[in-house]
Image: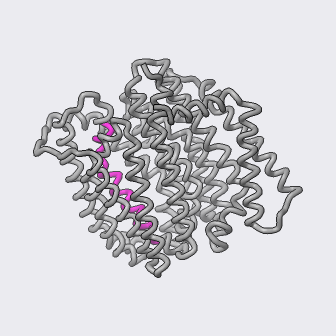
Amino acid sequence: MISLSKAASKASFWNISSNIANGMVRFLVTAILAHFLSPSEFGVVGIALIVVGVVAVFGNTGLGAALIYKKDSDDTYYSTVYWINLCAGIAMSLITVALAYPVSLFFNERTVFYIMPVLSVNFTVSMLSSIHFIKLQKKVDYKTIGFAEIVSNLIAGTAAVILAYCGAGVWSIVIQNVLMIVIKTCLFWIAVRWVPGLIFDFKKFLELFRYSRNILLEAIFNYFSQNIDYFIIGKSLGVKGLGYYKLAYSLVHIPYENFSKKLTSVLFPLLCNVKDEPKRYRRGYLNAIKFNSMAVFPVMASFFFIAGYFIPVVYGSKWVFIVPTAKILAIAGMIRCVNTFSGTIFNSQGRPDIGLKFNLGMFPFIFTALLIGARFGINGIAAAMLFTVIVSSIILHYILVTKFKVISFADIAVSLLPAVINSIILFVILCFLSKITDLGTNVLNLIFYMAVSAGLIFMIYFIGFKKDLNELAGFVSSMFRK
């Protein structure tokens, strides 16, 4: 029987590799667009995407996760979910169009009225390939998923840069979003030769919905908990403030979106397969925490130090304002990378209701903290976000330890130890070097400290945590084995 670690590594190779590539593409596209677009233009699109995200989370039926959780799904299940999802997609498109005018009035931004109907197309188009994507996930075929995402990101990103250069402004980002979904949907249909039958079984729908309803409700509250800061900034500080904050947030959350979050999608079906084998289940979860933190923590610690050089060099001097915000959010991003795996435990154990109750209970606390933080601008919002992430982490891991009794606090601490110690030593050395080294320009300083950081990260792991480094190397190398 293949070990969970090997299964995870084989499944993770294409998922993680493609998401690193996608992250690099999105990062480069955003960096180029930042030179052509103003913070206000980023903010206007940000408002539209926030509202679209709200509609999306309400329309996400959660039936896809139910299909993955269920081992004996047949074509009747798939066709039933397909038609439900497609109807939900059409409904979401219509709702988005209907919301365009009131949203433009609420945020006092007329451009949003024209943007939202165009973005609404994404809902219907994406649902056309919803089952194709689920089938690929269930087979853990992240090679195909990764290929589709890379191709769609490259084409859409290139189109956005060309449009921005030609003066298209906010529409360059809008077209990028729509084009990416259209291309990805076409590629999924080409890859998975499945056509839905004219079948709808209400009993099977109810069977899946009993599992998915809690995932749906959890996703709603989780979305608002993680994005309420955008609403508050957009309303209280305007589109310029939102543009600044959104770029800072998206920058430091690249590891979360393209590594931690994607690793979760691989971990979920694997843990579902071994949920009745406590030792393998525990080992899989703890390895995910350890490998994830070893990759993310030192990178975020390094970014915290070099942000003052990185942001003006990569995005331009007009974005220097976000340096303190990005530093605060970098710490929050480190903690969130660990928190993201908790939902995998809840769902793989058949208890998505726990995640729902947690997000429902945390929402008033998060909303209050962010309202207070908004009085101090985007840095206040960032500080409030960091505080709520810390509190959420403590509560989440308390639930994991006491409720499921699969892992202990000591297990979690041991798994995080290599990454935490590496990050602390790295940061101390960088601070010391900054006292005795100054190469004169932001570009030279950035190159120097990035090179030093890369060398130190490896050296600290090699000297102090060689066994853990070897395990990580074994995990990575097994991705390449047939």
By secondary structure, the bulk of the magenta-drawn segment is best described as: helix
Q: Nearer the viewer, residue 181 or 401?
A: 181
Which quadrant holds residue 445?
bottom right
Q: Position of residue 16 (x, y in %)?
A: 50, 44
Q: Nearer the viewer, residue 160 or 423?
A: 160
Which quadrant holds residue 314?
bottom right
| Residue at screen point 81% across, 46% down | 429
How many numbered marks are there? 0
- 420 is higher (above) or lower (below) than 388: above
> Which residues fall within the magenta stretch?
44-66
In the shown orientation, is residue 36 left or right of residue 146? right
Q: Position of residue 410 (x, y in %)?
A: 63, 24
- 32 is higher (above) or lower (below) than 337: below
| Residue at screen point 34% across, 69% down | 116
- 316 is higher (above) or lower (below) than 10: below
| Residue at screen point 23% across, 32% down | 73
Q: Position of residue 446 (x, y in %)?
A: 73, 60
User: Which residue is situated farthest in the right direction here?
Assistant: 436
Q: Nearer the viewer, residue 329 or 79?
A: 79
User: Which residue is situated farthest in the front direction here?
Assistant: 482
Q: Quadrant of the N terminus?
A: top left
The question of residue 431 being in magenta is answered with no
